[in-house]
Image: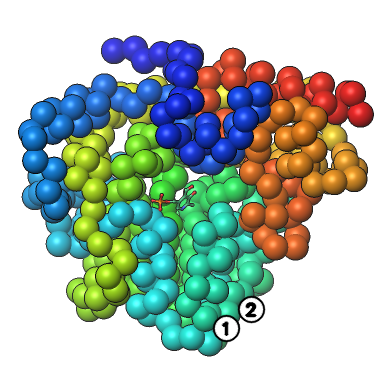
């Protein structure tokens, strides 16, 4: 089967967050969903379910749990049991629940910065002290982990929130790096909360390694958060899941739904199962398209906007652009919004003080849209 990722789909007027926030003359390249039509297998399953006229409260069926177990074994060589899976209305509620359940106000949690804003802000919701592990692209642009810094920041910390693949850098952590992280977390007896929502969107033949899959000991201190939402463009259906192999940790985690993290969306459950059962061909085709978009993006920026530094993302459909050398005299997000009519994510969403000269660009769009956005940006810089 072939899938047309070049098809232009008008998302205006559909309640899309991405396409509603800005006026019609602005090209939105910000919030992390893609502009691609969802895999036919998912649309069919949701349509079939919608034909049943009752949409009451839903629970995960055994078939969905079995599908997740099969998926994790096939893709990541990770063997879990159906009981390890906790369905959630999102990864974001999942990491907030984990912080509330396992840390007390005043405790510390380490996070990699820059980082996706809801992670940056979550420690503050629960009175926790955030310890920043500052990521650096290094000369090779590999964002190699500085283990010495990591060790220092983990001293006395109750938990580490790992984001792998990382948003916004697109870094994929290697097995060796993950073993180093796990070793330090074990020595400090810290919980690992591992946000792996982008784990399927990994380029250049790299493999995603769930940190909990490295050993049963590591799994016992880890809450892994996953979803089909980024991979299959179903984020609006608000469905995710945690994998927690330690029964005590799982019970304590579940107890912290606290009336806020209630049952999961009926259609999200249906869509997640259909995605895992029948979406692989679409997923692989999309990955190839995204990787080609990534290449076009990197080449175009290097050739036409050399004042912007971009290290090719190893995963995700997000690119982290360092605009500091442009010396725009204002935040690049504001500059490109006004002068290029392109809406990017502002750098200061990813760290309060250190990343105001960055923007994050979402290349989960048609090639034509990507080229249009880049051309608008290039022209705006030329007109300066
Ligand atoms: C790293 C990361 N975690 C979590 C989320 C949000 O997940 P959810 O919509 O399942 O809460 C995103 C969305 O962009 C993300 O990039």
Q: Which x, y percent locates residue 256?
A: 29, 74
Vertical comparison of 383 with 353: above or below = above
In the rendered image of this protein, does residue 319 appear above or below residue 262?
above
Determine which quarter of the picture holds residue 85: bottom left
At horizontal 64% and vertical 54% (from top left) the residue drawn is 349
Q: Which residue is mark 1?
A: 155
Note whether 324 is above or below 257 in the view shown: above
Q: Which image quadrant: the C terminus?
A: top right
Whether residue 303 is visible here, answered yes or no, is: yes
Q: Are marks 1 and 2 in contact (CB under 8 Å)?
A: yes
Q: Which residue is mark 2?
A: 152
Element under disc 2: helix
In the picture, which quadrant includes the N terminus?
top left
The verdict on label 1 being within 8 Å of ligand 1 is no
Circle 1: is it few (<14), some (14-19), or many (20+) Cα within 10 Å?
Answer: some
Seen at 53% across and 20% down, the residue is 366
Q: Is residue 153 left or right of residue 52?
A: right
Relative placement, left or right, of 8 versus 282 is: right
Q: Which residue lies at the image location 42% right of the left edge and 45% below the top edge?
A: 199
Nearer-the-camera pick, 260 or 99: 260
* Number of other residues with Cα within 10 Å of mark 2, as a class: few under 14, some 14 to 19, many 20 or more: few
Q: Residue 219, how many percent across, how many down?
A: 32, 67
Q: Position of residue 16 (x, y in %)?
A: 45, 34
Viewer-side residue, 175 vs 11: 11
- Rendered image coloring scheme: rainbow
């Amino acid at each position: 089967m072939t899938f047309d990722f070049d098809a232009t789909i008008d998302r205006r007027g559909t309640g899309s967050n991405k396409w509603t926030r800005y006026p019609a003359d602005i090209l939105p390249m910000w919030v992390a969903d893609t502009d691609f039509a969802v895999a036919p297998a998912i649309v069919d399953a949701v349509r079939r379910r919608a034909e049943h006229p009752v949409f009451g409260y839903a629970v995960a069926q055994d078939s969905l749990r079995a599908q997740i177990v099969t998926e994790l074994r096939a893709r990541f060589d990770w063997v879990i049991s159906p009981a390890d899976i906790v369905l959630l209305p999102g990864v974001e509620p999942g990491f907030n629940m984990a912080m509330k359940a396992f840390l007390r106000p005043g405790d510390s949690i380490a996070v990699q910065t820059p980082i996706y804003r809801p992670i940056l802000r979550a420690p503050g919701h629960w009175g926790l002290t955030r310890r920043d592990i500052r990521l650096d692209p290094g000369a090779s642009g590999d964002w190699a982990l500085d283990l010495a810094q990591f060790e220092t920041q983990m001293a006395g910390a109750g938990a580490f929130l790992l984001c792998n693949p990382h948003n916004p850098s697109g870094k994929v952590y290697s097995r060796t790096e993950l073993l180093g992280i796990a070793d330090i977390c074990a020595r400090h007896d810290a919980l690992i909360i591992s946000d792996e929502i982008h784990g399927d969107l990994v380029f250049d033949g790299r493999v995603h390694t769930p940190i909990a899959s490295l050993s049963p000991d590591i799994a016992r201190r880890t809450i892994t958060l996953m979803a089909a939402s980024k991979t299959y463009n179903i984020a609006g259906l608000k469905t995710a899941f945690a994998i927690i192999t330690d029964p005590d940790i799982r019970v304590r985690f579940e107890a912290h739904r606290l009336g806020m993290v209630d049952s999961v969306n009926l259609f999200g459950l249906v869509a997640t199962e259909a995605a895992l059962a029948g979406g692989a061909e679409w997923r692989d085709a999309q990955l190839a398209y995204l990787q080609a978009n990534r290449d076009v993006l990197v080449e175009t920026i290097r050739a036409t906007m050399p004042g912007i530094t971009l290290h090719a993302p190893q995963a995700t459909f997000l690119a982290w652009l360092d605009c500091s050398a442009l010396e725009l005299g204002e935040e690049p997000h504001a500059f490109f919004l006004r002068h290029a009519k392109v809406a990017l994510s502002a750098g200061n969403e990813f760290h309060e003080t250190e990343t105001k000269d960055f923007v994050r660009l979402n290349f989960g769009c048609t090639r034509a849209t990507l080229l249009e956005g880049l051309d608008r940006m290039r022209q705006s810089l030329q007109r300066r």
